[in-house]
Image (cartoon, grey):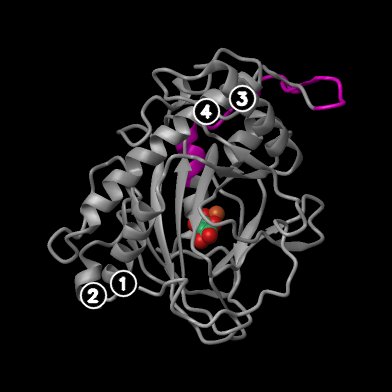
Amino acid sequence: MSCCTSAPIVTQTCETLLSKCEVPIIDLAHMGTERSPQKGVVKQVATKLVRALSEKGLALLVNHGIPECKLKAAYRALDEFSELSEETKSKYERDPSTNHGYVKPGMEKFSDEEEIRHAYNITGYKGALPQDEVPGFKPAVEELARDFKQLSAMLLTALAVGLEQSPDFLLTKHAHMLGTGNETTLRLLYYPPLGAPVPGVTRCGAHSDYGTFTLLAQDCEGGLEIQTPRGDQWRRVGHLPGAILVNTGTILAKWTNDQFPALRHRVVVPEHCGRGRHSIAFFVHPNNDIPIEPLDIKIVKANQESAPCRLQKKKRGVLTAYHHLQRRFRETYAS
Ligand SMILES: O=C(O)CCC(=O)C(=O)O
Ligand SMILES: [Fe+2]
């Protein structure tokens, strides 16, 4: 596996949101667990989370409880899988009916450019994992999926508290994360090294995520950029070792009437010879039957009056979480 310690260090001269102190950093230490949350700490996190997601659309989480060694084990597992023959990999290809499985380079496109990445989606539909070919794959992804699910449950609790709802207001909408009837997905990503930028080739085209929120762990290769809310600029996010990024997805944006914007983001090829990028995304989705329409909540922003969310009358033809997602998949997957 390419690793941050063995390759020459390229001095990063470019500014990032992180280097300009423009990404909120939220410390999750001592939040407790889903069963015994530390209410005072949850409240503090809740305030910071609502502020970060409403003002910036993203935050970096530290002391989140997911150890780096588990992330590295999953990075390694996908590296090993990517090196298998095309014929072997094709046995594990993504099943469009469950979204589970391997997505080879070129299969999923967010832009007109060629997008070179290997992805392995792990959903709650108990699809195949390459146990025989890569023995470390299953334990690595099972442990990580459990950890990401726990972290997401704590964040959903904090978010509900921050929105002045009962602590389980959002959790109940996500009751079946990684079970049937819920499209929450753990996704391992590997972008092989390209040497230098190649015209017409990118790593991941611009898009916003489809779910409630996404948690993203990444190695030190860099390349992740977000579009500023006015849409006029792309900014590098930067890398804070050990931190996990949280960003709003389009479902949370719809629930909050865009008061939590779903940031568009992309991954570009580094200007200097890169070593390959690894990242792990955990896409948090509500249960399939949950309607996606503005929620009846008020969002209290610092120094502003609370804004009512339900600005429109209930419309006919409201999509459920499931139909919302299928519509987005049709836009991005080659058939
Ligand atoms: O690799 C990354 O850092 C981003 C991946 C991503 O945005 C996605 O899969 O939705
Ligand atoms: Fe994304």
Instruction: Kindly identify the amino acid type of the residue bearing the numbered disc 3.
Output: Arg
CB atoms at circles 4 and 2 under 8 Å apart? no
Instruction: Please tell me which of labels 3 and 2 falls first in the chain.
Output: 2
Q: Is residue 285 left or right of residue 89?
A: right
- Label placed on residue 184: none
Q: Residue furthest top?
A: 166
According to the image, label 2 marks what residue? 84
Q: Residue at x 60, y 41 (%)?
A: 250
Q: CA distance from mark 4 to mark 2?
A: 38 Å
The stretch of residues the image draws in magenta is 302-326
Q: Say which mark, if any, is on residue 316.
A: 3
**Three-letter amino acid code of the residue under disc 1:** Ser
Q: Position of residue 58 (x, y in %)?
A: 65, 45
Residue 113 shows in this picture: yes
Queried on whether the Cβ of the residue with tag 2 lies below 8 angstroms from ligand 1, the answer reads no
- Residue at x 47% of width, y 44% of height: 283
Query: Which residue: 51% across, 19% down?
Result: 38
* Chain-order first, disc 4 or disc 3: 4
User: Does residue 286 show up?
Assistant: no
The N terminus: image quadrant = bottom left
**Secondary structure under the numbered disc 4 in the rendered image:** helix
Q: Is residue 332 above or below residue 182?
A: below
Secondary structure state at the residue bearing disc 3: loop
Q: Secondary structure at mark 1?
A: helix
Circle 4 residue? 156
Image-based side of 287 in relation to 251, left or right: left
Residue 267, compared with residue 122, is above or below; it is below
Q: Which mark is residue 82?
A: 1
Q: Is residue 260 above or below residue 14?
A: above
